[in-house]
């Protein structure tokens, strides 16, 4: 394994993690304001963010790649949370309208294969939203947070990677401008940091968000990948 991330559940249950999740959910909801009737896959560690659409999406599944398995399941994890290899997602082709990839690409053992699997399970007009640590941001420098692990990306690097894997980039944003504070007192100003950073230092956000659409016209024949046997998926029971 090239990279591993542990303690995701611990981070998002901490005050800093709760504030970060709230800020990112707000930004994600602005990008995708209404997913009513659409099928949504959260790939990576998406549980803290999927709640923004769980009540309106027709199907909402969270899949954690095997190498990212946390020490404990997310609190109140629904039965729709699962574990499977990142390069063999246990879904048929054309299964989802939207795919949210968070805490997955930067720690992927093979980013190309992960994105190809995302392309495969998305419908022909499907949309991918990727959230990764920004190489220029402060959060990528702090190993005490999940954003300080794995491979950070500059916006240009991420766009080039997506284009090579047959996605057409449609928009790009930055988020998480507050420094990685731990103090509850300093965390109270997170909203002000977000507004100020968005207006004055858009290139210094802690994370980069890129929305890309599946590009059917960029499809090229690729060499078949030998099957690894049956695809297995481990599903958490309700309340696990």
Image: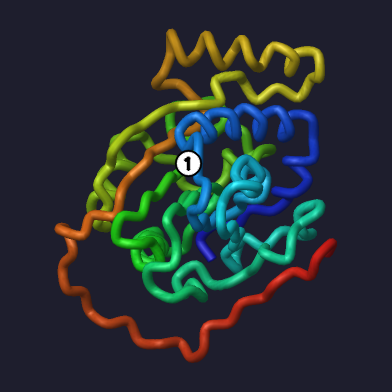
Residue at the spot 81% in from the left edge and 54% down from the top edge: 76
In this image, 39 relative to 180: left or right? Answer: left
The residue that disc 1 covers is 132
Q: Quadrant of the N terminus?
A: bottom right
Query: Regarding mark 1 in the picture, which secondary structure is present there?
Result: strand
Residue at the spot 52% in from the left edge and 57% down from the top edge: 41
Residue at the spot 60% in from the left edge and 47% down from the top edge: 56
Quadrant of residue 124 in the image?
bottom left
Q: Residues within 10 Å of mark 1 (few under 14, many from 20)?
A: many
| Residue 73 horizontal/vertical position (percent) | 77, 59
In this image, 9 relative to 148: left or right? Answer: right
Q: Quadrant of the C terminus?
A: bottom right
| Residue 167 horizontal/vertical position (percent) | 27, 52
Residue at the spot 60% in from the left edge and 19% down from the top edge: 178
Near-viewer residue (125 or 67): 125
Near-viewer residue (203 or 75): 75
| Residue 74 horizontal/vertical position (percent) | 76, 54
Asked whether residue 161 appears in the rendered view, the answer is: yes
Above or below, 37 against 240 in this view is above
In the current view of this chain or complex, which residue is farthest to the right?
A: 239
Asked whether residue 107 appears in the rendered view, the answer is: no
Give the image's coloring scheme: rainbow
| Residue 77 horizontal/vertical position (percent) | 76, 57
The mark tally for this picture is 1
Quadrant of residue 129 in the image?
top left
């Amino acid at each position: 394994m090239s990279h591993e991330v542990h303690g995701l559940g611990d981070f998002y249950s901490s005050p800093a993690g709760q504030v970060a999740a709230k800020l990112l959910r707000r930004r994600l909801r602005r990008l995708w304001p209404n997913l009513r009737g659409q099928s949504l896959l959260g790939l990576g560690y998406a549980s803290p963010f999927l709640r923004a659409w769980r009540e309106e999406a027709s199907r909402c599944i969270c899949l954690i790649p095997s190498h990212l398995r946390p020490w404990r399941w997310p609190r109140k994890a629904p039965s729709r949370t699962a574990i499977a290899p990142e390069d063999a997602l246990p879904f048929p082709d054309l299964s989802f309208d939207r795919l949210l990839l968070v805490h997955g690409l930067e720690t992927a053992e093979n980013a190309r294969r992960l994105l190809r699997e995302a392309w495969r399970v998305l419908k022909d007009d499907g949309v991918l939203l990727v959230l990764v640590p920004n190489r220029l941001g402060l959060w990528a420098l702090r190993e005490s947070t999940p954003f300080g692990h794995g491979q950070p990306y500059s916006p240009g690097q991420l766009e080039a990677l997506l284009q090579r894997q047959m996605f057409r980039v449609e928009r790009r944003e930055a988020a998480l401008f507050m420094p990685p504070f731990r103090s509850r007192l300093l965390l109270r100003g997170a909203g002000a940091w977000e507004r100020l950073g968005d207006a004055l230092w858009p290139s210094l956000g802690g994370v980069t968000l890129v929305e890309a659409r599946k590009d059917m016209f960029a499809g090229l024949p690729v060499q078949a990948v030998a099957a690894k046997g049956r695809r297995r998926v481990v599903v958490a029971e309700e309340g696990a």
